[in-house]
Structure formats: structure tokens, C-alpha cells
Image (spheres, grey):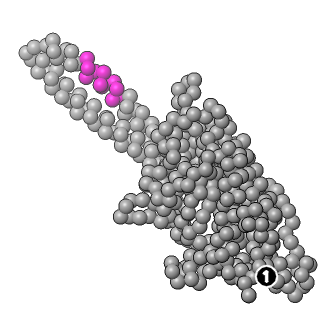
Amino acid sequence: MIDLQLLRQDPDVVRASQVARGEDPHLVDEVLDADARRRSALTEFETLRAEQKSLGKRVAQASGDEKQALLAHTKDLAARVKALQADAAAAEERATELARRIGNVVEEGVPAGGEDDYVVLEQVGTPRDLAAEYGPDFVVKDHLDLGEGLRAIDTERGAKVSGSRFYFLTGVGARLELALLNAAVDLATRNGFTLTITPTLVKPEIMAGTGFLGAHADEIYRLEADDLYLVGTSEVALAGFHAGEIVDLSDGPLRYAGWSACYRREAGSYGKDTRGIIRVHQFHKVEAFVWARPEDAADEHRRILAWEKEMLALAELPYRVIDTAAGDLGSSAARKFDCEAWLPSQQRWLELTSTSNCTTFQARRLGVRERTEDGTRTVATLNGTLATTRWIVALLENHQQADGSVRVPEGLRPYLGGLEVLEPVR
């Protein structure tokens, strides 16, 4: 959650961040008020506690009426001390509850505004002109038509078995997903990440610690009988991996790559991308997750983005990088870069990766610290997508050929047994 020390020392920074996010800046003043009441109650509590101790010595030495008077005063003092302790606890609970509603302080330079106010940082590669290649009568196929022709994607049977937004990946479809994920694993381990296969069910305190139980809690599947949540990203489990620990960052950031199934209810997305496998309830992903010193976090963020771009180059996809606007950031992110690949069938950009710098927001909630010469301090967390099922959408569409076959990017061929072309099944 938000750093209360920053809130006290520089509340205007937090107010400005709230405004940039399109959130209520008055929450800052409410937190400060509750915090002031807590500190005032604690100060008075400590004063009366000291008086209590002093009074105890006087009672032991007194006798007669003086002792009775002191005992009566002691009883009254005890009641006041108890009330002040309760007041301080209530004010602290209120301050914490309000502080948890304040999003992370956005980095300087993050665009203000909402979903459409992003800034394009760069575009890499040029989308293919399929009409120029195959003639003006060529009809661009979407990923589902291509996938069904390859017998790689079966949404009809997915819906029969599990309902809408579910699917089967079959044959080369299943192999293609594994190829992408294994390529991501190789890239991650080559760059010093520790590979993990993470739990997909987590406790409420872990889900809350990552900031996912805020405004978008309705997108998360919950198993009420077990009081567990299904993760929408292995970021959640990896964030909890060192919860309550003091980590050693003396040799640099701790980097983990998490492979997991992911689950999202997609609440509020009714009617959006219902065809195919763009927006589904279950998928697989390899996620980069990093613990770093706060002063190293921005540089580490750029490194994760570079690794994502390396994966996109391997897949030979035209893409652009956007700097997400403050109002479109999750509550934990101080800054987020998205990589969006070109989608020929819809003539638009489709998000394939995101990388977020969460600074100390998640680690503070989860109690992850490092030891320094001045004691301990909260560390920073970062995350980023290295590959996921959705990449199949962009791969099939961008590498389609006139006969319905799909060219395999050279970098993925070793993961597909050397296959150069995915052929339709006649």
C-alpha cells in the first residue's frame, strides 16, 4: 500500500497522483486525519501510561485516606488509558483501510488520463500488406478460421465442455503454445531468472497483498468453500513467495519466471472479443517477477521491457510499445508499458505483453524487506509477460499464407521439431 511516511511528508505528490489516475484526492486528507488522531491518541496514551507507573509507586508508599484517593485515581487513569488505546487502534485501522484505497504513486512522466490517453513510445516492424502480396481479392482470415483449418483451435467443443470463452488447443495448436512458453523459459533462464511452476490457488491475504482485490475483484474466481482464489497471473503467487521475509539483494535483483495456468472471469467484458481465444477464462503464461532495490526499479523495468521485445522479435511480430496512462494503471503499478502486436483481421493493435513497476506498493503489503546499514526497508517489485496463449492469435494472423497455411517464425522452429510451415488439414 501507499507509504505513510511519503503521505505525511509530501501529500501533494500523492494528491497529484490521485488526480492523474482520476481518483479522489481527498482520500489523502482523510488518511492524514486518521493518522493524526492515531498519533495524538498514542502520545496521550504514553503520557498517561508513564503517570500510571509513577502512581503505582506512590500507592505502594501511601496509607489511609491518601492511599484510597490514589487508588481511585489509578482506577480512573486505567479506564482512560484503555480508552485511548482503543481510540488509537480504531484510528490506525481507519487510516490503514483508507490508505489501501489509494493507488500507487505514479512515476513522473506517466501520461494523465484514461484508457485512450496512452503515449506510443515506438513502433517496431511494418504490418504486412496482405492484399498487395496475394491480390486485391484476398480475404484476410482471422485466427479462429486459420486455427480451425489447422485443427489447432476448437472453441465449439470448449463451449460444450466448459461454456463460453473456453476452448481446446489441439495438435499443432497445443504444440504452438508450448513452443512459445518454452521459448520464454529459455530466454528467462538465459538471463538469470529462476524458473518456477507456481500454485494457481492462493490465500486471500496474498491476493490482497498484490492489490488485486480492489476495483477489479469481480474479475477473480473465488472458491468460497476453501477461502482460496484462482490466480489471473503467476505474479500473485510469486509476490507471495517471499512474503514476511527479509531478502538479500546484495548481488542484484531476485528474478523469477513463473509458468502457470491463469483464470479470469472477464467480468465487465460482455461482448468484447468473444470470437476465438483473444479474451478467455483460462490460459497459460510465463511471467517475469522481480524483487529489486527501490532505486534500481526503473532500470529493471526497462530490462523487462527489453526481454519482452526480444520475445516479440523471435516471433517476428510487428508491434508498438505504449506508455499506459495513469487512469488505466492497476492500483499497484506506478508505471506500465504494454507491447501491442498488429492484428490483420481487425486492423488494430492487440496487447500481448505488459510490464509494471510496482515500486514498494506490493512489498509493503506483503512485508518483504531487505537489510541495510540503517536497518531494514521495503523492497520494490516488478512484473512482465514473456509469453501467453494470446500470442497464438497474432502469430497465426501475421504469418498466414494464401492457402490457409501459416509460416513458422525461424526462432520458434526448434521448438516445433523444425517445422517451417503449419499446413491446413484437408
Instruction: Name the residue type under label 1.
Output: Gly
Q: In this view, does 119 lie to the left or right of 38?
A: right
Instruction: State yes or no: residue 299 in magenta.
Output: no
Tell me if I can see residue 12 in this picture. Answer: no
Tell me which residue sits at (83%, 78%) in the image: 401
State the image coordinates of residue 40 (x, y, percent, origin top left): 40, 32
The answer to whether 9 is drawn above or below residue 385 in the figure is above
Residue segment shown in magenta: 44-54
Q: Does the magenta stretch include residue 45?
A: yes
Identify the image quadrant of residue 277: bottom right
- Residue sitting at 73 percent across and 67 percent down? 416
Q: Main secondary structure of the magenta part?
A: helix
Q: Which residue is drawn at 69% across and 56% down?
A: 184
Q: Position of residue 146 (x, y in %)?
A: 73, 80
- Depth check: give the residue in front, 279 or 161: 161
Quarter in which the C terminus is drawn? bottom right
Q: Which residue lies furthest to the front in this view?
A: 417
Front one among 413 and 97: 413
Find numbered disc 1 in the image and state the secondary structure of the residue it sits on. Answer: loop
Q: Is residue 75 above or below residue 424?
A: above
* Residue ID at (43%, 54%): 203
Write down the residue under mark 1.
Answer: 404
Q: Nearer the viewer, residue 90 or 153?
A: 153
